[in-house]
Image: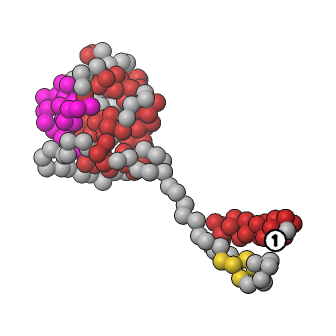
Amino acid sequence: MNTMLRKSVLGVAGLAFAGGLAAGPLHATNAITASPVEAKPVAVVQADKPDSGKLIPHGVQGAQSRIDLDGEQVANAKAIIAATKKAGLPERAAVISIATSLQESKLENLGHLGDRNDHDSLGLFQQRPSSGWGTPEQITDPQYSTTAFLKGLKQVDRWQDMPLTDAAQTVQVSAYPDAYAQWEQQAADLVAQHWNS
């Protein structure tokens, strides 16, 4: 086959290949035999979801809870994931953070709740200005509050090897230390869904 004919055949096949991605498989004609040549469909590679072994390395503990999330709650979960990535921490840190926020605020960026407020707790993680977490404005900023939580998490020796509830409790010092465990599966599902989106 001469060079000119080879370039022509490759050009036709290339057009069929490119067109197949947008409009489905196309049929090209082999320039030598005039017989139809079918372009092979190309699989579109999507970003891989994080490995469940990275998200829940110890398996979930106890009965799991799940709530339906509205757009604001999903946006807050995405903000936690973005802050985790920006801090250079792995998916597991995002799972712990989201599970903590699910327990503390149901992923709602809570302001002062008046008589229902637990002292001066605010934001996604119910952090307290009086305990040194930051100003009310800072604590109610999802990126700031997540970064503050992650800073505390990084100070926990071997947090990556701990069950979720132990890691979260070490940072949060909650009156209900085992309550975080119930949100691990939903938190892992959110991280799996949004980590690469």
In the image: residue 177, left or right of residue 168: left
Residue 87: quarter of image? top left
What's drawn in magenta, residue-wise?
A: 160-184
Residue that appears at 13% across and 50% down: 63
Residue 186 magenta: no
In the image: residue 79, left or right of residue 9: left
- Residue 82 is situated, as x and y percent measured from the top left of the image, at 45, 36
Using the image as rendered, state which of residue 83 and residue 142 is in the foreground: 83
Looking at the image, which residue sits at the far right?
Answer: 4
Using the image as rendered, state which of residue 163 and residue 135 is in the foreground: 163
Instruction: Name the main secondary structure of what is drawn in magenta.
Output: helix
In the image: residue 177, left or right of residue 85: left
- Residue 193 is situated, as x and y percent measured from the top left of the image, at 40, 51
Residue that appears at 29% across and 45% down: 53
The tally of labels here is: 1
Rendered position, 54 above or below 83:
below
- Residue 167 is situated, as x and y percent measured from the top left of the image, at 22, 30
- Residue 169 is situated, as x and y percent measured from the top left of the image, at 19, 29
Say if residue 18 shows up in the picture.
yes
**What residue is disc 1 on?**
1
